[in-house]
Image (cartoon, rainbow, N blue to C red):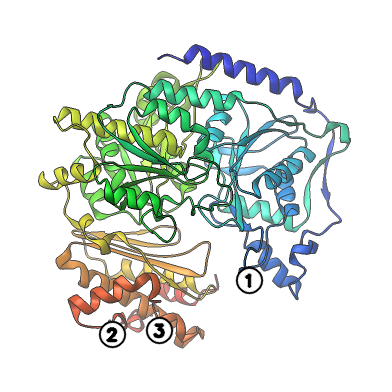
Amino acid sequence: MDHQETIIGLMRAAKGKIRARCAKNARAAWDIVTDPADILADPAYAHAATREEKRRLFREVQKEYDIRGFVAQQKPGQPPVNFPLSLAFRIGAALASIRFETHKGPVSLEPGDVFLIGRDNGPDSSARAGALAEGLATAGVNVVMLGVAPSGELYNAVSNLGARGGAQVTRSHVEININGIKLLLGGVTLFGDHIKEIFDWVEENRYRRMRSPADRGAIIDGITEAFEIQRLRYLERYEGKLDPACPVAIDLGGGTAVKYRDTLARIFPSIVRFFRDEDDPHSTKGLADPTRLDQRGNYAEAYDFSVANPSVPVLSFDLDADRFGLMIDGKVWKGDTMMLPIYEEQIARKPGTPVRIDARTNLIVDEAVRHWKGRSICQAIGHSKVKKGMDLDLVQEAADAGYDDADRYVQDHPDRAETFQGEFSLHLFRFKPERDDEGRYVGTPVDDAIDFACYFVRMLQQRGARLSRPCLQLPEYLDMLRAQGIIGDSYTYRENNIEIRTEYDPLLKKNLGHAAYELFRLVADAEEEVTWIDDGVSAISAGRKLMLRFSNTSPKVTMKCDARPELWIEAASRLLGVFFGITDYLIARRGMDAGFRTISRGENEFLYAIFKERAGKDVHAIAPFPVEEYLGVASLKDALDKEF
């Protein structure tokens, strides 16, 4: 059904409501002020003995891809609060005050601009969204409060309603004592140095303040059109287009996706069962984490159903519905393999199209993309970085088509400009330009899990119909690719789908990542592609794919070995040998605690079991790489000894 006329009417109605309630302060006077109330004097930091300790707690909320910290202490022994409401206020005020340099040029919020805030249904999110809005309004920005809304609804509303940017307040998939904020401004998802700049301003207690209280921005609610527009877009794209003979079950996670339960019931004609389809702000039925749906200790109901009904895929969402999960016969599939049917269609439509493969993805993704004549690019991990990569790819696509302006290319070729990318972590991205009420095509790369779930199922059903295999499921599709010689069988082995995570010295983890890159680069053969991925190294060669990276959010390092069975022990030994060789150097030369050499068992039990079974030895018996032999290479020595 064509809902376009109704959607345009809703856009105009929403914009009219917002304009009528906005502060008319675009030319009002303002100052950059230093607040006499020091942010580090907030009672949340009072337990810290020194100012440096207070500062450390405060800076821990500054993450690489977003803003995230502890907002409550639910149980004894959990980390203390480091993200008070006063910090949310200051973040809003600083965000409105800074001119950020980005890959799209400078972006900023000015007095009179409109900014949207959405949130999940968690117990802390309403108050945190309110504090963020107050900070923005103090700096003269008009704030539209969307209330409980999935991330996709927020991101699309920024384009649909002509707003300058938006923020999603969400804990995503983690415990309720944590909350966070994701920021979009001027079509750019802020991350890295942008987040740091916000925290620099907050630590200096600086922000813009309107001289007259009458000129502060308005805080506006009641704009329900954003939801209606999103709902109608889903229906326009998918209603009546899915096969009623193909059953599904849907786990809404008790989060923001619950808002679209009735919409999904209209799109999917054969929903066998809904799980967690009522608001569950305290996650009493388990965390809304699609990657953990097979862990009965978190939430058993959907898993037990999946095992009992192996022909019925279970679709799932996290709390803010920016991650889409798929479980079949009790097995959770990750974003890398789920993207393959999408990549196949995209490359066929746009030969040579770049596919941004994050460093954790299974080897088969690289194999398939190369077979289909796509362009495989090793991508740094992080949804913000993938979105930036998609922006840059669009600029290049426009240039290749003879355009010096990407927007003109989008206006002339909106369907061809549509692009998909995906991450191992189940963030699956789509750039799909849509007409606004002025007749222009607008949009930004969005990780809208509800839209992607519908698109994914439709794509597989269409592929199955062409092959006379109705209700085609992902495992069958992968088996077909394997039978055709397009991919190998590495995805069928459990060890290739698990990351090795271990505690590491937070002051030296970056040395490990940088030094590992230098070592792999030094010893790589002609066929091996070694890539720096912003926080570590990826090394790809025939039949194997290795990764070592340091966490940007915790004192951990992560490794992953993906290889054909006959190569796995050799490949894993090479990866772990580099880890042990660098670690031994840091223990001997930098005074690191020797305990960090031990790879924690816990979640890495599989690693110990494989080495005992296939190699007859303990993991720690692997020979360390002889780092000392390469210390004459200045770049390696610098990576080992630098103070990061």
Residue 107 left/right relative to 312: right
Residue at left offset 65%, top offset 52%: 197
- The answer to whether 422 is drawn above or below residue 606 in the figure is above
Mark 1 or mark 2: which is in front? 1
Residue lying at 69% horizontally and 56% vertically, measured from the top left: 200
Give residue 621's mark: 2
| Badge 2 density bin: few <14, some 14–19, many ≥20, Cα 10 Å | few
Distance Cα–Cα, label 1 vs label 3? 35 Å
At label 1, the amino acid type is Pro
What residue is rendered at 42% in x and 83% in y? 585
User: In which image quadrant can residue 18 be found?
Assistant: top right
Element under disc 1: loop
Whole-percent x, y for residue 224 in the image: 62, 25
Residue at numbered disc 3: 584
- Element under label 3? helix
In the rendered image, the vertical position of residue 362 relative to residue 451, given as above or below: below
Q: Quadrant of the C terminus?
A: bottom right
The residue lying toward the viewer, choosing from 392 and 129, is 129
> For the residues marked 1 and 2, what is the alpha-carbon distance in whole angstroms?
38 Å
State how many labels appear.
3
Q: Please rate how many residues cluster around mark 3, counting C-alpha atoms within 10 Å: few if below 14, some from 14 to 19, many from 20.
A: many
Return the x and y of residue 500 as percentages of the image width and height: 36, 68
Q: Amino acid at mark 3?
A: Asp
Q: Earlier in the sequence, mark 1 or mark 2?
A: 1
| Residue bearing mark 1 | 76
Please identify, in this view, whether the residue under mark 3 or under mark 2 is nearer the observer.
Answer: 2
CA gap, disc 3 to disc 2? Answer: 13 Å
Residue 380, image x and y in percent? 41, 53
Mark 3 / mark 2, whichever is N-terminal: 3
